[in-house]
Amino acid sequence: MSQFSLEERLNRLKDKYLSSKNQEFSNVHLSKVKKKLIILEKERCRCRLEREDTKKIDDKIEKLKKELIDVMKEE
């Protein structure tokens, strides 16, 4: 009986540890995506000021926004 409870507790701890690791990964990933998005927005503004083509940057921004939305939905 005590062996079963010990095994059960170990499984719970393992699950808790794995879920916290996933949450950490999610938070780190989310902050990286946000940083990339900010950098691309700044680059887009610079390109507009210099009258350059912003199509590639706009595409990257849209892709990152979709990725950000997906990550936020998972949480």
Image (spheres, rainbow, N blue to C red):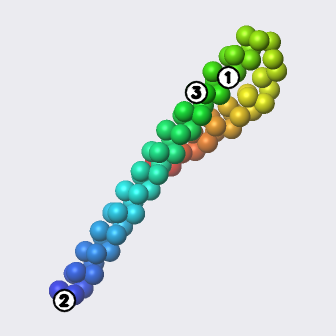
Q: Which residue is mark 1?
A: 43
Q: Which quadrant would residue 52 be assigned to in this image?
A: top right
Position of residue 19 in the picture relative to residue 34 (left or right)? left
The residue drawn where x is 25% and y is 74% is 9
- 16 lies above or below 55: below
> Where is residue 4 shown, x and y percent of the image?
24, 85
Q: Is residue 32 visible?
A: yes
Seen in the picture, residue 62 relative to 18 is either above or below; the reply is above
Amino acid identity at mark 2: Met
Q: Are marks 1 and 2 in contact (CB under 8 Å)?
A: no
Q: Which residue corresponds to the image point at 82% horizontal and 21% vertical from the top-left?
A: 53
The residue tagged 2 is 1
Q: Quadrant of the N terminus?
A: bottom left
Between the residue at mark 2 and the residue at mark 3, the CA separation in whole angstroms equals 56 Å
Q: Is the residue marked by circle 3 packed among few (<14), some (14-19), or many (20+) residues within 10 Å?
A: few
Q: Amino acid at mark 1?
A: Glu
- Left or right of 36, for residue 26: left
Question: Sequence-wise, which precedes: disc 2 or disc 3?
Answer: 2
